[in-house]
Amino acid sequence: MSSSNPQYRWVMILLFASALVSVTFGVRQAFGLFLIPISSEFDGGVQLFSLAIALQNLIWGLSSPLFGAAADRFGAWRVAAFGVLIYAAGLLCMASFVTEAGIFFGQAMIGIGLGSAGISIAVGAVARAAPPEKRSLAMGLVTSFGSFGQFALVPVAQILMSQHGWQFAMIILSAIVASMIAVTLGMRVPAGGARPLEGVVQTAGSALRQAVSSRDYILLTTGFFVCGLQLVFITTHLPSYLKDSGLTADIASWSLALIGLFNIIGAFVCGWLGGFMSKKKTLAIVYLLRSLIITAFITLPPSPTLALFFGAAMGLLWLGTIPLTSGLIVAFFGPRHLSMLYGLVFLSHQIGSFVGAWLGGVWYDMFGNYEAMWWLNAGAGLFAFAVNWAIREPTPAPVPA
């Protein structure tokens, strides 16, 4: 398979975009392991680092539409190359300046790096490159392959931290992220090699006005808030919750790693289902199943087996929302401005992430447990199920014989 063959060029872009997401997202998922070690450096409890992670998620969300619009116009690889450098610098800043300002500034840089080299840029690049009949599957694949980083990097971060301390682990992760500059070059589209996009030519401003006046786009955006709330609460506070339940840090790291491993299956299946089934119904059911799994997890007695099962079960539902959500955006508005429009929906996701990370830390420092936060996440999943079920999904155009 030659990357110069237009028939397969989208596959090469898919592989490079997946590698980028694998590292940028995988490193991000390891931050929950650093909650206790970094919090112990200060006297403010866990809410200090929780707030820093919350700030990172908010900046990630705020910057995503801006970088998405830039990627739509100037090319995803340029934006992603800038992002990995900022991301790596943020990790290095946290390791080098162990102060409140250093932690917050480092997390802010990481937020900018994720906004410009994260999942929204990768999904947009792949959606524009893939043929229409393979688009939903391609978006599922980039999300699926990108999950390998969480499975691989979370245990590595835990080993490095256990043997050499959290600062050394952060420096190594910074070097790994910086190496992704080479991967971004593989996302370039040769001159004249861009796939023609179907539909009426539309300006970014016109697409934005159409989106914000769409009932269904607003419902989709509202539901995605819950996705962010659940994901970042779990990745940030699950290790602390398991520690309080008498389980080891190794169990916590493997529980997070299993989320990444099983998401490889879950995201692929969701992308595949989105190609021929109702995207909005599949998306709604993902949120419903999350609520059921969270409820079972917090009502059953804690054990290593339950923690690992929870990681595997949540992994099957973890990022399957991304190909379905982005697929609905394409169904509403076409792929031309996907990075920008997905970036706006992702902003809602990151506001939810801010709430999940920060409120979890505040609640824990005030009451010494996470019980109410777990129930909040379960209830929010039921709300997202109802919101997404109410979306009016466009009927696919008939395919000519």
Image (cartoon, grey):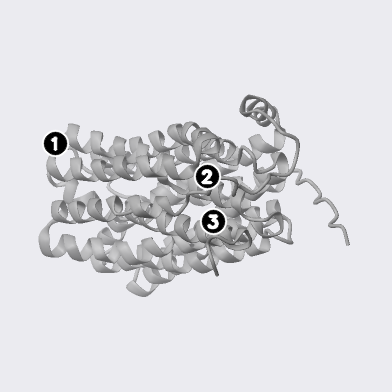
126 or 174: nearer the viewer: 126
Sequence-wise first label, 1 or 2: 1
In three-dimensional space, the C-alpha distance between marks 3 and 1, rounded to whole angstroms, equals: 37 Å
Sequence-wise first label, 3 or 1: 1
Q: Is residue 251 left or right of residue 77?
A: left
- How crowded is the residue under tag 1: few (<14 C-alpha within 10 Å), some, or many (20+)? some
Residue under pointer 2: 226
Is mark 2 in CB contact (under 8 Å) with mark 3?
Answer: no
Look at label 1 and name its amino acid: Thr
Quadrant in the picture for the C terminus: bottom right
Task: Residue 198: name its quadrant.
Answer: top right
- What residue lies at 14% left-to-right and 55% top-to-bottom? 168
333 or 36: nearer the viewer: 333
Q: Is residue 84 left or right of residue 141?
A: left
Indicate which disc residue 99 carries.
Answer: 1
- How crowded is the residue under tag 2: few (<14 C-alpha within 10 Å), some, or many (20+)? many
